[in-house]
């Protein structure tokens, strides 16, 4: 299906080659996991497969790429697009329509697909990614994970022979990731060739036929997935996550949520099964953490209700947030977990002053967000969005990281120290003179995180900061957060990476359906007595 000979590519603004002497052959129907540290050339390689390089992205291109016998230099992008479906790292970059149904239909309409066949394909694709119930929803109202599913469905509807996915599960909860991977594996079994880029190696390795690791624009390892444990030293050397998870946290989180639902049911209706009661009672999970009253509270949320549609605000079931109570103290990292669409990002936007409570109260660093907007909270609160590209507006990485401190009128020497520390910790020193939008997805995220951390705000809000990052850079980011909380700051972290949450968070908050259903220390949430047997 794929044949690559001596492929090299260098972007016009770079001295180093993004790809250097790539030689690769992939048979039809194979499922390939492509991984490597951020900036190693993975996304660039994917763009060579569907003709974006060299037809749309300029640069020094050498070598040859064949897709099912077609030489990509000789075929226009619109022809290659019918053979190769590419799901981008950021779903916002490929969603054009305002309604989910229209987005799935967009590609089929351009291919003049018959109407009845189109309807059948749309329903099939939506069902495969668990988005059937959202087909008439606005794409702008979807969470990041839901947008990712729509992007995958829009490609599945075209039924391409080669499906290339650039971190399609990076913003999905474990349940959603499992569903997408099951779909992708079935497509592979049906004869579609799959190339999937992902840093969550331990979640994907078991599904793949082969694993390819890239390093500095070259292929460092190309092995059958069954031989992966013979090469663990390579993963460690390149700063990648081990293909075997240390602990199977997913089922334990599911048990924790089940416990919360069982206790809620018990409070409202005592007529539920005795065995479920017994199981719930053995969980011993704290619903609310005890606070040291001598430590300063930086965030206080009381009975917060919010609906994106003000006309439906009186309908409690239609609200995105439903009676949220949350306190966060100085000196702690709080992890916010939950399924896509559970209200995590909406809650975070309230903490940043981007939304105003329709009912209830939000106090951040002693300021009522009704009276203080995001502009007036700047410097006290810093937020990293799911899509870091929206935050990058300067001409160089150095200017970007220095922008916030300069506008806060910090002393010049302090700005220099803060910017230098962030660039060093995020491994951006060599990229300080590059335009932020020319960086890889992972590098852009680290740059956006640096713009927040350089201001040293009292409350740091991070929405999926581990997305697109290898484990080495994740640990460096979390180490920097740990240093900041030791200085009396607070970090609120939205993540689907349960291992990172268990390792670095002082407290875990689990959301479901716009509510906080569970809250406690990581050991209480993830390691309940009746799930000890699930440890792997």
Image: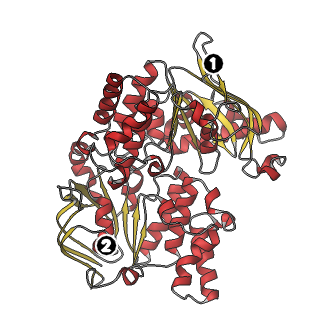
Q: Is residue 397 left or right of residue 466?
A: left
Identified at 59% across, 31% down, the residue is: 376
How many C-alpha atoms fall within 10 Å of the one at disc 1: few (<14), some, or many (≥20)?
few
The dot on residue 363 is none
Q: Are marks 1 and 2 in contact (CB under 8 Å)?
A: no
Q: Of discs 1 and 2, which sits in the foreground?
A: 2
Is there any visible trace of residue 343 in the rendered image?
yes
Q: In this rendering, is residue 392 above or below 118?
A: above
Numbered disc 1: secondary structure: loop
Numbered disc 2: secondary structure: helix
Is there any visible trace of residue 535 in the rendered image?
no
What is the distance, in whole Å, between disc 1 and disc 2 at their CAs?
54 Å
**Residue 422 falls in which quadrant of the image?**
top left
**Residue, disc 1:** 290
Identified at 64% across, 38% down, the residue is: 350
Residue 380: x and y in percent read: 53, 27
Q: Nearer the viewer, residue 31 or 528?
A: 31
Q: Is residue 402 left or right of residue 319?
A: left
Q: In this rendering, is residue 33 above or below 351?
A: below
**Residue 99 falls in which quadrant of the image?**
bottom right
Residue 348: x and y in percent read: 60, 39
Q: In this rendering, is residue 482 above or below 424?
A: above
Q: Nearer the viewer, residue 429 or 299?
A: 429
Residue 330: x and y in percent read: 54, 20
Viewport quadrant of the C terminus: top left
Viewport quadrant of the N terminus: bottom left
**Residue 52 falls in which quadrant of the image?**
bottom left
> How many numbered badges does the structure rendering display?
2
Identified at 33% across, 55% down, the residue is: 438
Residue 311: x and y in percent read: 82, 52
The dot on residue 49 is 2
């Amino acid at each position: 299906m794929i044949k690559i000979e001596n492929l090299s590519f260098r972007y016009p603004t770079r001295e180093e080659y993004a790809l250097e002497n790539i030689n690769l052959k992939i048979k039809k129907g194979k499922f390939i996991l492509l991984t490597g540290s951020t900036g190693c050339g993975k996304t660039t390689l994917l763009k060579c497969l569907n003709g974006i390089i060299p037809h749309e992205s300029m640069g020094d291109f050498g070598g040859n790429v064949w897709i099912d016998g077609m030489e990509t230099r000789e075929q226009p992008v619109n022809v290659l697009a019918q053979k190769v479906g590419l799901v981008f790292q950021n779903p916002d970059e490929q969603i054009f329509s305002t309604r989910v149904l229209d987005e799935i239909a967009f590609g089929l309409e351009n291919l003049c697909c018959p109407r009845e066949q189109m309807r059948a394909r749309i329903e099939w694709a939506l069902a495969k990614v668990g988005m059937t119930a959202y087909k008439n929803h606005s794409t702008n109202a979807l969470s990041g994970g839901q947008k990712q599913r729509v992007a995958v469905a829009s490609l599945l509807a075209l039924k391409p022979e080669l499906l290339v996915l650039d971190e399609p599960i990076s913003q999905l909860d474990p349940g959603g990731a499992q569903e997408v991977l099951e779909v992708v594996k079935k497509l592979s079994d049906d004869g579609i060739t799959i190339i999937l880029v992902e840093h969550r190696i331990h979640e994907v390795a078991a599904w793949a036929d082969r694993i390819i690791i890239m390093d500095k624009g070259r292929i460092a390892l190309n092995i059958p997935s069954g031989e992966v444990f013979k090469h663990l030293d390579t993963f460690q050397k390149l700063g990648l996550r081990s293909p075997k998870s240390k602990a199977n946290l997913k089922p334990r989180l599911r048990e924790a949520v089940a416990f919360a639902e069982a206790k809620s049911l018990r409070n409202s209706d005592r007529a539920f099964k005795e065995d479920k009661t017994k199981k719930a009672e053995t969980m011993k999970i704290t619903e609310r953490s005890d606070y040291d009253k001598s430590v300063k509270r930086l965030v206080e949320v009381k009975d917060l209700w919010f609906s994106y549609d003000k006309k439906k605000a009186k309908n409690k079931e239609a609200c995105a947030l439903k009676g949220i109570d949350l306190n966060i103290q100085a000196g702690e990292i709080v992890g916010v977990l939950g399924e896509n669409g559970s209200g995590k990002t909406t809650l975070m936007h309230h903490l940043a002053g981007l939304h105003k409570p329709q009912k209830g109260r939000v106090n951040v660093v002693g300021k009522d967000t009704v009276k203080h907007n995001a502009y007036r909270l700047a410097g006290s609160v810093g937020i990293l969005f799911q899509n870091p590209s929206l935050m990058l507006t300067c001409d160089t990485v150095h200017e970007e990281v220095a922008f916030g401190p300069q506008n806060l009128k910090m002393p010049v020497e302090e700005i220099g120290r803060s910017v230098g520390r962030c660039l060093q910790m995020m491994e951006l020193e060599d990229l300080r003179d590059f335009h932020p939008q020319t960086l890889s997805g992972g590098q852009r995220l680290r740059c956006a995180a640096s713009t927040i951390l350089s201001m040293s705000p009292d409350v740091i809000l991070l929405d999926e900061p581990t997305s697109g990052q290898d484990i080495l850079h994740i640990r460096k980011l979390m180490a920097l957060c740990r240093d900041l909380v030791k200085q009396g700051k607070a970090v609120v972290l939205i993540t689907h990476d349960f291992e990172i949450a268990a390792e670095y968070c002082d407290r875990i908050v689990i959301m479901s359906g716009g509510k906080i259903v569970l809250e406690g220390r990581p050991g209480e949430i993830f390691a309940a007595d009746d799930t000890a047997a699930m440890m792997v």
